[in-house]
Amino acid sequence: MMAASLLASALAAAAQPGMASPQRNYLQYCSGCHLPDGAGMPSKDIPPMKDKVGRFLEVPGGRNFIVQVPGVMNTPLNDGEVAALMNWILHGMAKSSTPPNTPPYTAEEVARLRATRPSDVPAVRRELVDKLRAKGVPPDQLP
């Protein structure tokens, strides 16, 4: 019930004029699962993004993975809109976890990454999280 209320608030906010397109796209296409603030729903295996998803950029394959998750792969947004959304998430919502000088995604990179996808997304995620653990990332900072 609370998630439905949060989603309704997010969708109402998405209709506000002047809101940046990436934020509006986040609210429309991502917040239903990851919640408007990016907290996710870990109890339902929906990982948090706020201050965490940038950690994936610390390990090989993590940059690709962020674009190759099902929600991104299946969104109706075009590659440029996805690039803008990913950049907004990494440099806004996940800023404290995003390594400094992270290059922005481009439409061309997103198109290349969306042309392929992992056959087992949860297994790839587990592998990336294991690599982060091996680097010493504390459990409370894992995406």
Image (spheres, rainbow, N blue to C red):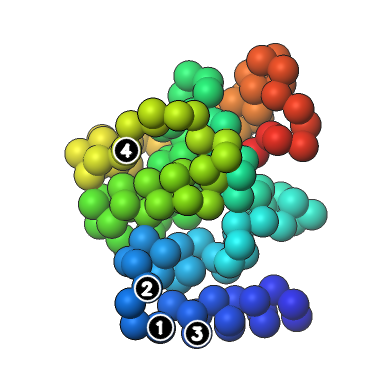
Asked whether the residues under the numbered discs 2 and 1 touch, taking CB atoms below 8 Å apart as contact, a structural biologist would say: yes
Give the secondary structure at mark 2.
loop
Residue in the picture at 53% in, 21% down: 59
CA neighbours of label 3 inside 10 A, class few (<14), some (14 to 19), many (20+): few
Label placed on residue 12 = 3
Residue 59 visible in this rendered orientation of the protein: yes
**Closest to the observer: 35 or 46?**
35
Q: Position of residue 135 (x, y in %)?
A: 66, 15
The image quarter in which residue 24 lies: bottom left
Task: Using the image, determine if residue 52 lies above or below residue 4.
Answer: above
**In what element is the residue under mark 3?**
helix
* Mark identifier at residue 92: none
**Could you tell me residue 104's position as x and y percent?**
32, 38
> Which amino acid is tagged 2?
Met
CA distance separating discs 4 and 3? 29 Å
Q: Residue furthest left?
A: 108
Mark 2 highlights which residue?
Answer: 19
Q: Are marks 4 and 2 in contact (CB under 8 Å)?
A: no
The tag earlier along the polypeptide, 4 or 3, is 3
Would residue 42 appear left or right of 108 to someone viewing this image? right
* Residue placed most toward the observer, 118 or 58: 58
Q: Which residue is mark 4?
A: 104
SS at badge 4: loop
Mark 3 vs 1: CB contact within 8 A = yes
Q: Is residue 119 visible?
A: no
Q: Residue at x 77, y 37 (%)?
A: 140
Question: Rounded to the nearest whole Å, what is the CA distance between mark 4 and mark 2?
Answer: 21 Å
Q: Measuring from the top left, give residue 53's x and y in whole percent.
A: 56, 40
In this picture, residue 46 sits left or right of residue 31:
right
Residue designated by label 1: 16
Q: Residues within 10 Å of mark 2 (few under 14, many from 20)?
A: few
Badges 2 and 3: C-beta atoms under 8 Å apart?
Answer: no
